[in-house]
Amino acid sequence: MKLAMLPFKLHQDRLFPSDATQRAIARQLYAQVAGLPIISPHGHTDPAWFADNAPFANATELLLVPDHYVFRMLYSQGISLDTLGIPRRDGSRASVDPRAAWRVFAQNFHLFRGTPSYMWLNHVFHDVFGLRIRLEGRTADMYYDHITAALGRPEFRPRALFERFRIEVLATTESPIDSLQHHAAIRASGWSGRVITAYRPDLVIDPEHEQFPSALQTFGEITGEDVYDWRGYLRAHRKRRAFFAENGATSTDHGHPTAATANLSAAEAGKLFDRIVRGKGSTDDAELFRAQMLTEMAAMSLEDGLVMQLHPGCFRNHNRGLFERYGRDRGADLPLRTDYVHALKPLLDRFGNEPNFKLILFTLDESTYSRELAPMAGHYPALYLGPAWWFHDAPEGMWRFREWTLSSAGFYNTVGFNDDTRAFLSIPARHDVARRVDCAFLAKLVAEHRLDEDEAAELAVELAYNLPKRAYKL
């Protein structure tokens, strides 16, 4: 007996409260924000997509290969990255038919039940591609053919999707040695879509990064500065920051292992830098140098107005064997306990009271929300809290973030939502989840008579649209 394919439909009340009173309020709030344009001020999509506007190749290349949230889960169940067609560190790939890789994904889609990826992917399948049958092994080929055929049509090219998703602005993230040629091509094309860059200098700031020596050399060649001299090195950063700003950047981003900052004298910093570039620095020197550079970047932000973001507390590439074979960003990064109160004090002593400096903090250590981050952001004019990030970018994580930061930081010391993703088609799904969770949270406050409905309606718009736009100077 042939089993019927299982239908699926996105429920209009998903993520809203089960309590009828709160659910009704959440519906009303959501109706006012559901159609707002998307502000995506921090992410990792490829600007070449929008510069070239070429069709995406197939379902696997678009939805599976770039998304480490997806292949991380599959890898955890013993499925090799070669089987999925994930590129290796040297740029090669196993000889895998993308349809076969998609079948493996479909046969294991049940692994994602209840996860954020399950919500995001089903949103994409349902709203972007109009699919109404559940993805499973039996429907793998139907999905693959339907999605791949759609990608060949003009309305599924990157720019058309950008416009369909109502993205007002999308920020990518590039290293200081990137030419930004794709951003230049976007501007030269005359297309009205706003795709900007962000300055991510980790390659030339982290002495423990495997590309640091070669990146530093290129950094000097691009800027014409002697980057092996402390003053020349700082001038090179100022030049590249100015170049990024000319290409639309309004922010910088820093992905350090810790939130440590330092405030060394120029002489001390110069001596430290000399040890670093001569290869004589210790592990402690590397940490101190990263710490000093956060303070230097803050000083430059006060000069040029770029908003500073800090994403600390991640043990990168924990799986050594996977890193050696496949390289970075392959789902092997893990959260760490992170101190902010002591770590940020040197930087805050210099810049924490500056009204023209803005530092947006993120964390993978939720225990710091109410103990450290919210009280700090609720005091220092320069500090703002970024949304629940990475492992906590889920309905439960978003709710905890609001619950644990509200009493000390309020809503207006936060910056709304950003999707921080490489998976382009998941952007509207992620923003929809954030809007629904915020509306549910606000509905609870209204039902408990802690907010009036008009205040909640105003806050819903602030969180979905106005706060990120203001925070990132967009």
Image (cartoon, rainbow, N blue to C red):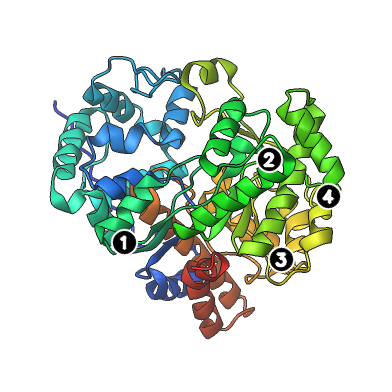
Q: Which residue is mark 3?
A: 382
Query: Which label sits in the foreground, 2 or 1?
Result: 1
Q: Is residue 391 left or right of residue 54?
A: right
Q: Gap between marks 2 and 3, in whole Å?
A: 21 Å
Q: Are marks 3 and 4 in contact (CB under 8 Å)?
A: no
**Which of the pair 64/3 is nearer the observer?**
64
Q: Which residue is mark 4?
A: 263
Occupied quadrant, residue 1: top left
Residue 266: image tag: none
**Which of the pair 436/165 is nearer the observer?**
165
Q: Earlier in the sequence, mark 3 or mark 4?
A: 4
Q: Which residue is mark 2?
A: 313
Q: SS at mark 4?
A: loop
Q: Earlier in the sequence, mark 4 or mark 2?
A: 4
Q: Earlier in the sequence, mark 2 or mark 1?
A: 1
- Kind of residue at badge 3: Ala
Residue count near mark 4 (Cα–Cα under 10 Å), binned few <14, some 14–19, many ≥20 = many
Q: Gap between marks 4 and 2, in whole Å?
A: 21 Å
Does 229 sit above or below residue 367? above
- Residue at 57% x, 84% y: name it: 452
Q: Which residue is mark 1?
A: 193
Does 152 sit above or below residue 25? above
Image spot of residue 193 (x, y percent): 31, 61
